Amino acid sequence: MDNDNKNTYNTQGDKDLQSLISNAIENRKILDASNSNGPTGVIPIPSKEQQKADPIHESDPKQDKTPKKKKGWSKKKKTGIALGIIFVVFIIIIAIIVGLFFHYTGMLDRTKDTKINSGRAPINSSELTSEADTFDAKEKEDELKAQLQKQSSKISSEDVTNILLIGEDIRDTEEESRGNTDVMMIISINTKNKTITMTSLMRDMYIYMAQFDEGNRLNSAYWHGGCEYLEQCIEDYFGIQIDRYARVNFYSFIDIVETVGGIDMEVSKAEAEGMKKPMAEQNKYLKNKKGTDYISDDIFAGKNDEDKVKLHLNGNQALAFARLRYVGNSDYERTERQRRVISEIITESKKLNLVQLDKLLNKVLPEINTDLTDGEIANLLLNAFDYMKYDIQQLRIPADGYFTNEVIYSMDVLNPDFAANSAFIQYIVYGSCKNIDEAIKQYQEENAYNYSYDTGYYGY
């Protein structure tokens, strides 16, 4: 190749080289301006000095030990911590609930009254009559002995809990003694039928108590042997199992009514007047002024004795209303008043907030004696909201037409048909009957009964 051609070739090569260098310089400026990760997407090659200062090359991930930015907690770790906090809070809540439960149940009176009173139970002189006895006591007691010997096993069910509510006579509360109980009511909770049945047992039913070889009114069993012996007598004569008892005095009754804010009751003019006598007795023990809480006569101005007015009763008035005996049909209407009062207390108690409920429990629990265990009380509390939705049924024993009025030992007593009245309790508490009319109809159909004017009973 001659020199001219060489020069032409070299000149062109120089131009090409210069062009490449110029392009390289421009590219470098562009890369520097974009901090090595600009829109070109070109990653610059580090210089030898940079490589010496940072020998770990990015292209070798196995040797990349460049410290990375610290990350936050993983989702799994966050979930675990949240569950841990929830568990701790749950344990604290359970501890508080358990603590409160044992605080309240610890207030209950669990002492058992094992005292046995022998001899004849005392009789209030005001309850004696001048009428002659209508049947021979010895013959009647022999009849009741034979009945007890024939008594079949007591009916019971895992679906039914029977709690005997015992109300002490006001005089017994004040004197801290044990007398003849004023109130005997069986509270039956049927979880299958979703019913609560309140069965009032009339105190004047005549029974024979084999353990003491004595015939007397049912309420005298409490004087002889306390709550447990009264339980036993009820089981023997009515053939049902009494699971537990709760005994209350008149102070606790007043506190309950006051805590729920009082109760609304339909009160007749005669009842309002009749309430003054038991209230005078209560005021004496409560150390109230004479006439405290009497219902004003002005409310019933121009009304007849049977005319009723809806009144809001406080605790003292409600107790007098429940104790009232000598207005209307004696003890028959008194037991009905007691059931009405308790039904209204249940209704009002549903409205209590936690502060009011705490106040009620702190006042009342120390005044209640019971053989309910902590476990049974816990079960009742856990199901309390369900129980509040149950239908409430009422029953009075003995039922009309299934007893006779008698006089014995100068006492007015009731002579029940125990077979029939036992059946009524079982039909309503354990069966499908909703009231006494349904129970009587079923009993008559099953036994083909006809009324006997000689005995005063329905019989074959």
Image: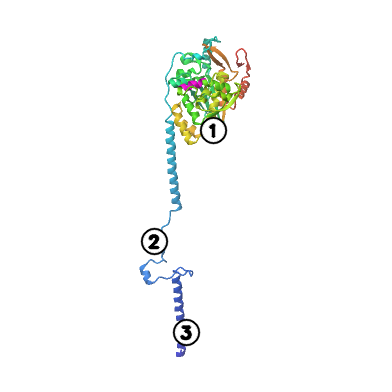
Q: Residue at horizontal 50%, vertical 28%? A: 257
Residue located beneath label 3 in the image = 12
**Residue type, numbered disc 2:** Pro
Badge 1 or badge 3: first in the primary sequence: 3
Q: Residue 282 magenta-drawn?
A: yes
**Residue type, numbered disc 3:** Gln
In this rendering, the label closer to the viewer, 3 or 2: 2
- Disc 2: CA contacts within 10 A as few (<14), some (14-19) or many (>=20): few
Is residue 248 in sight in this rendering?
Answer: no
**Which region shows up in magenta?**
277-284
What separation in Å lies between label 1 and label 3 (alpha carbons)? Answer: 107 Å
Residue located beneath label 1 in the image = 388
SS state under label 2 = loop
In this rendering, the label closer to the viewer, 1 or 2: 1
Location of the C terminus (image quadrant): top right
Towards the viewer: 240 or 36:
36
